[in-house]
């Protein structure tokens, strides 16, 4: 295994992102007003305890977000988690309990369930993909096809499902794609724009990194990845030894030939299959021998896990 992208765990950056989202969600729900339904029906001094319960089978992610919601709404509430993120659960499993002022509990309910449901849905979807390729060398990766503002959280959900994170953003890797190749070249004498060849783009990227980041700067070791859409391009680009080559929308037979070509030419270069990857096709793709499989479906097509709040007292 060669260089790797940053892998997202629950850290200060993820917590900051979560806190910003929670604050925006509170404003969205209350609009600087009040939960009038709760205020007119629930006594001010009422207290209670409720359990967070999984309504369906899945993988849990986002439990640390519950405490952030409490911090933002009412710190008199107390949350006790019964398990940790990344755990697979069955319907009826209690994830934890919250006790405190009943009005605050009712106001926080939907925000807590939305966060847990979204992130657990991503973790559950990812776990299905990971299990589908079990026994092969392929690792499952996410993409940047995430909900705006939710990227680190959604990538955290992928990690809790057993998947791997591709680059977090444009800032942490060089990924040369088809539009970079099409638009990056200077116009020729006739005014026409000639596309870069992938091999030329990799060479330029390596030169750029060497000239702009001194020895000791972590950015000097940033991943250089390039997208190709044909075996001819792959054969050429392997000579420049990029860290990763993204094989775009290739058939299983093309992927097998790509692996053979890589093994004989540049065995240290990793191959990533991408484009149209689904749960039904991912096993066949993995069996071709590629190292990585990336799919936007982990995040953009994940269905939220059904999680509920049941009053206990």
Image: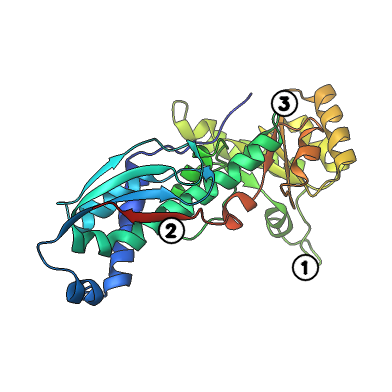
Exactly how many numbered labels are in the figure? Answer: 3
Disc 1, disc 3: CB below 8 Å? Answer: no
Of marks 2 and 3, the one in the foreground: 3
Element under disc 3: loop
Nearest to the observer: residue 241 or residue 106: 106
Nearest to the observer: residue 88 or residue 158: 88
Q: How many other residues sit within 10 Å of disc 3, few (<14), some (14-19) or many (≥20)?
A: few
Disc 2, disc 3: CB below 8 Å? Answer: no
Q: Which mark is residue 149?
A: 2
Of marks 2 and 1, the one in the foreground: 2
Q: Position of residue 187 (x, y in %)?
A: 74, 62
> Residue at label 3?
135
Q: How many other residues sit within 10 Å of disc 1, few (<14), some (14-19) or many (≥20)?
A: few
Q: Position of residue 105 (x, y in %)?
A: 24, 59
Q: Position of residue 68 (x, y in %)?
A: 27, 50
Disc with the residue nearer the chain's start (2 vs 3)? 3
Say if 237 sits above or below 178 in the image. Answer: above
Q: How many other residues sit within 10 Å of disc 2, few (<14), some (14-19) or many (≥20)?
A: few
State the separation of the CA atoms marked 1 and 3. 52 Å
> Residue at label 1?
191
In the image: residue 189, left or right of residue 213 = right
In the image: residue 264, left or right of residue 218 = right
What residue is drawn where x is 40% and y is 55%?
308
Quadrant of res 102: bottom left
State the separation of the CA atoms marked 2 and 1. 40 Å
Disc with the residue nearer the chain's start (1 vs 3)? 3
Element under disc 1: loop
What residue is drawn where x is 58% and y is 28%?
3
Nearest to the observer: residue 294 or residue 107: 107
Say if 162 sits above or below 295 in the image. Answer: above
Can the viewer see residue 278?
A: yes
């Amino acid at each position: 295994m060669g260089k790797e992208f940053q892998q997202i765990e629950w850290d200060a950056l993820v917590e900051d992102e979560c806190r910003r989202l929670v604050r925006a969600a509170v404003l969205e729900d209350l609009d600087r007003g009040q939960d009038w339904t709760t205020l007119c029906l629930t006594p001010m001094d009422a207290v209670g305890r409720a359990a967070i319960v999984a309504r369906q089978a899945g993988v849990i992610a986002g439990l640390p977000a519950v405490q952030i919601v409490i911090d933002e709404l009412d710190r008199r509430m107390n949350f006790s988690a019964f398990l940790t993120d990344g755990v697979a659960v069955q319907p009826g499993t209690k994830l934890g309990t919250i006790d405190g002022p009943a009005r605050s509990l009712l106001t926080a309910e939907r925000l807590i369930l939305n966060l847990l449901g979204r992130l657990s849905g991503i973790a559950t979807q990812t776990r299905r993909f990971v299990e589908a390729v079990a026994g092969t060398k392929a690792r499952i990766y996410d993409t940047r096809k995430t909900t705006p503002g939710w990227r680190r959280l959604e990538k955290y959900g992928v990690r809790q499902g057993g998947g791997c994170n591709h680059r977090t953003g444009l800032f942490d890797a060089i990924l040369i794609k088809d539009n970079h190749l099409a638009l990056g070249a200077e116009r020729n004498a006739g005014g026409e724009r000639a596309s870069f060849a992938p091999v030329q783009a990799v060479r330029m990227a390596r030169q750029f990194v060497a000239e702009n980041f001194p020895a000791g700067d972590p950015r000097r070791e940033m991943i250089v990845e390039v997208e190709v859409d044909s075996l001819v391009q792959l054969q050429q680009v392997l000579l420049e030894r990029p860290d990763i080559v993204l094989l775009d929308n290739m058939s299983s037979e093309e992927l097998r030939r790509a692996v053979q070509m890589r093994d004989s030419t540049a065995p240290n270069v990793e191959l990533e299959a991408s484009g149209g990857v689904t749960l039904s096709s991912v096993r066949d793709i993995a069996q071709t021998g590629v190292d990585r499989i990336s799919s936007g479906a982990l995040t953009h097509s994940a269905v939220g896990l059904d999680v509920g709040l049941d009053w206990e007292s």
